[in-house]
């Protein structure tokens, strides 16, 4: 396949710039703004949520990864190598989201409730060298003390204590990451707790969860180093009838405890979309965390496409000037395709959706809406779909020194042939 030269891209951009100027959009300003927005890539796409604790097993907790594409990362070094390739193909400067099971303990078995910042020193050094911010997550699944489907809301006090201590340790690790890198880490708590069939008592597990979370957050941590978030889910495998950490539970908890609320695009009913929730919760919360994924039927974690749902989510952030109050992360895993390509395509789609939102004449559209001119608003929004935004995107890629169009696949296929296929 042939790709345009830089000169061709620049000439097409000049025409697109003129076309957008006619509707009052400054494409240079849009690209400058776009370059300031980081996306937090998720480490677990590279190894199918395996981590480096020991022998592979069922990750459980309502999670399932399908496919066996060659080249899965087997060590932290391989995972960082794969990530380096992915970042080199994505325009902009971005972050990495780590789970606790990606600790490097030098071959020594370390209980999750005893993890320390030193077990993530190599990740911190790598992030600093590559100008990546880091985010963090306790891992409350794939463990003997989560096999019955309950962690922080378990009726067993010993089980709850173990997971409370794990989450406390993870907050300290997140804070160490934020302090070392000069930008706060978002440490996000998600639990798999719930019942496969209809429970008799829906209240008690939620009371236990609230008490456990209060213990986790009891120690104040400087928000310059760490920000706490809590994440809901509608259902998971094994918790189809009841999830302790529902959206309503965590919304109330985040509001009363001043925590970030994580909205995951795949964690709601298929007829719900989180773009309609963003402005509602940010009326009352200072900041939120987004986990951008794509739900397909029962599964919540497909590689994101440049869909209407993704575009509308990014429009909410841009139209309402919410980017400074929103932390954008990705959360999907697909082992049926090249894992590096999954990172690259999904992240490029997220950045493209942001660009599309930034190329709207938002002020003019808002005035039409406020004036009751819904007809013209509708017509212009439809006409925008045919604007030459692709030429602006290609120019941004050239600006950022990454391949245009699908040319990034040449690098990925070469890497697959030379590195991934030999694992």
Image (cartoon, rainbow, N blue to C red):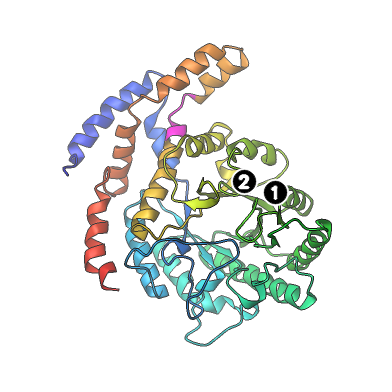
Q: Which residue is mark 1?
A: 247
Image: magenta residue range: 356-361
Q: Quadrant of the C terminus?
A: bottom left
Instruction: Please state if 370 lies on the left or on the right of 215 as rendered.
Output: left
Which residue is rendered at x = 28% and y = 49% of the image?
401
Q: Quadrant of residue 127?
A: bottom left
Circle 1 SS class: helix
Residue 106 in the figure: left or right of residue 258: left
Q: Quadrant of the N terminus?
A: top left
For the residues labelled 2 and 1, the Cα–Cα distance comes to 8 Å
Which is nearer the eye, 418 or 318?
A: 418
Residues tagged 2 and 1 counted as in contact (Cβ below 8 A): yes
Q: Position of residue 261 (x, y in %)?
A: 66, 50
Q: Above or below — where is 303 with respect to 209? A: above
Front one among 209 and 260: 209
Q: Earlier in the sequence, mark 2 or mark 1?
A: 1
Residue 223 x %, y %: 66, 59
Residue 411's quadrant in the figure?
bottom left
| Magenta span includes 144 | no
Residue 301 in picture, x, y percent from top left: 50, 53
The residue at 62%/35% (across/down) is 276
Q: Quadrant of residue 149?
A: bottom right
Q: How many marks?
A: 2
Q: Position of residue 161 (x, y in %)?
A: 75, 75
Counting other residues with Cα less than 10 Å from the Cα at mark 2, is it few (<14), some (14-19), or many (20 or more)?
A: some
Tag 2 secondary structure = loop
Residue 358 is one of the magenta-drawn residues: yes
Q: Is residue 94 above or below residue 404?
A: below
What residue would you read off at disc 2? 268
């Amino acid at each position: 396949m042939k790709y345009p030269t830089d000169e061709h891209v620049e000439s097409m951009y000049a025409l697109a710039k003129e076309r957008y100027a006619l509707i009052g959009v400054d494409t240079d300003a849009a690209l400058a703004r776009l370059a300031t927005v980081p996306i937090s890539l998720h480490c677990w796409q590279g190894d199918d949520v395996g981590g480096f604790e020991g022998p592979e097993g069922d990750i459980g907790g309502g999670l399932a990864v399908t496919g066996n594409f060659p080249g899965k990362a087997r060590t932290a070094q391989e995972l960082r190598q794969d990530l380096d390739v992915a970042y080199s193909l994505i325009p902009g400067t971005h972050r990495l989201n780590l789970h606790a099971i990606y600790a490097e303990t030098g071959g020594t078995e370390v209980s999750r409730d005893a993890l320390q910042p030193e077990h993530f020193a190599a990740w911190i050094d790598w992030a600093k060298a590559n100008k990546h911010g880091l985010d963090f997550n306790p891992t409350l699944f794939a463990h003997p003390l989560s096999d019955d489907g309950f962690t922080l809301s378990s009726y067993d006090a010993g089980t709850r204590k173990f997971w409370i201590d794990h989450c406390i340790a993870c907050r300290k690790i997140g804070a160490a990451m934020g302090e070392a890198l000069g930008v706060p880490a978002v440490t996000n708590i998600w639990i798999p707790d719930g019942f496969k069939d209809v429970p008799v008592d829906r209240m008690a597990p939620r009371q236990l969860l609230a008490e456990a979370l209060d213990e986790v957050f009891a120690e104040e941590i400087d928000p310059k180093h760490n920000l706490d978030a809590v994440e809901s889910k509608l259902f998971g495998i094994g918790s189809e009838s009841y999830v302790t950490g529902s959206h309503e539970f965590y919304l109330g908890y985040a509001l009363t405890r001043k925590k970030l609320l994580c909205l995951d695009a795949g964690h709601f009913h298929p007829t719900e979309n989180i773009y309609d929730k963003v402005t509602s919760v940010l009326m009352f919360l200072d900041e939120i965390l987004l986990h951008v994924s794509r739900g397909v039927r029962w599964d919540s974690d497909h590689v994101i496409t440049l869909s209407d749902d993704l575009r509308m989510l990014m429009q909410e952030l841009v139209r309402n000037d919410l980017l400074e109050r929103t932390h954008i992360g990705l959360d999907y895993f697909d082992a049926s395709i090249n894992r590096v390509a999954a990172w690259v395509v999904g992240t490029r789609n997220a950045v493209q959706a942001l660009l599309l939102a930034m190329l709207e004449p938002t002020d003019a559209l808002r005035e039409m809406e406020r004036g009751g001119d819904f007809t013209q608003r509708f017509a212009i929004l439809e006409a925008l779909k045919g604007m030459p935004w692709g030429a602006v995107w290609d120019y941004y890629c050239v600006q950022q020194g990454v391949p245009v169009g699908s040319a990034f696949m040449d690098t990925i296929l070469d890497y697959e042939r030379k590195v991934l296929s030999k694992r």
